[in-house]
């Protein structure tokens, strides 16, 4: 189903570049795109998701977990490269910001 106007708050658009299919918050992509992601990267995403202490993490919790955002960024970048699209994405930006913040904490401590 395409991401409709006024859709429910518990869905979001597929993270693949240019895709507007609605998907559950716990899923980074629609099934069509997810199945194109290599199994190694899929495993990285799911392992990071399962490692979170919350049983059902919120989007904010997911977006603050370095392992999860890095793995999803890898998946998005794989698809972008395969499709000849720009690989930049908000997950890689979030991963870089989290890593930078952690590096700053290590220097201060």
Image: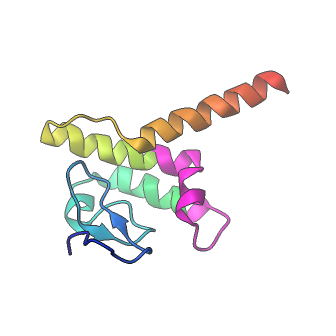
Q: Residue at x 41, y 42 (%)?
A: 90
- Give above or below for 77 relative to 4: above
Tell which residue pokes out farthest to the top in this image: 107
Q: Residue at x 32, y 54 (%)?
A: 15
In this rendered view, identify the residue nearer to me: 91 or 68.
91
Q: Quadrant of the C terminus?
A: top right
Name the image quarter holding residue 28. Answer: bottom left
Q: Position of residue 100 (x, y in %)?
A: 62, 29
In this rendered view, identify the residue nearer to me: 73 or 48.
73
Tell which residue pokes out farthest to the front in this image: 6
Q: Residue at x 68, y 27 (%)?
A: 103
Which range of residues does the magenta coloring cover?
Answer: 50-70
Name the image quarter holding residue 99. Answer: top right
Q: Is residue 80 left or right of residue 13?
A: left
- Tell me, yes or no, whether the highlighted magenta stretch contains residue 109: no
Q: Is residue 10 left or right of residue 109?
A: left
- Tell me, yes or no, whether the highlighted magenta stretch contains residue 52: yes
- Give above or below for 52 relative to 95: below
Q: Residue at x 14, y 36 (%)?
A: 84
Q: Position of residue 72 (x, y in %)?
A: 41, 50
């Amino acid at each position: 189903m395409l991401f409709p106007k006024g859709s429910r708050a518990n869905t979001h658009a597929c993270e693949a570049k240019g895709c507007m299919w609605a998907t559950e918050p716990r899923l980074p992509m629609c099934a069509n795109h997810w199945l194109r992601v290599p199994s190694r990267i899929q495993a990285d995403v799911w392992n990071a998701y399962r490692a979170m202490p919350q049983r059902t993490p919120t989007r904010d919790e997911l977006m603050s977990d370095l392992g999860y955002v890095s793995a999803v960024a890898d998946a998005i970048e794989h698809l972008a490269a395969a499709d000849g699209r720009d690989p930049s994405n908000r997950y890689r930006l979030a991963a870089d910001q989290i890593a930078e913040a952690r590096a700053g904490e290590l220097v201060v401590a």
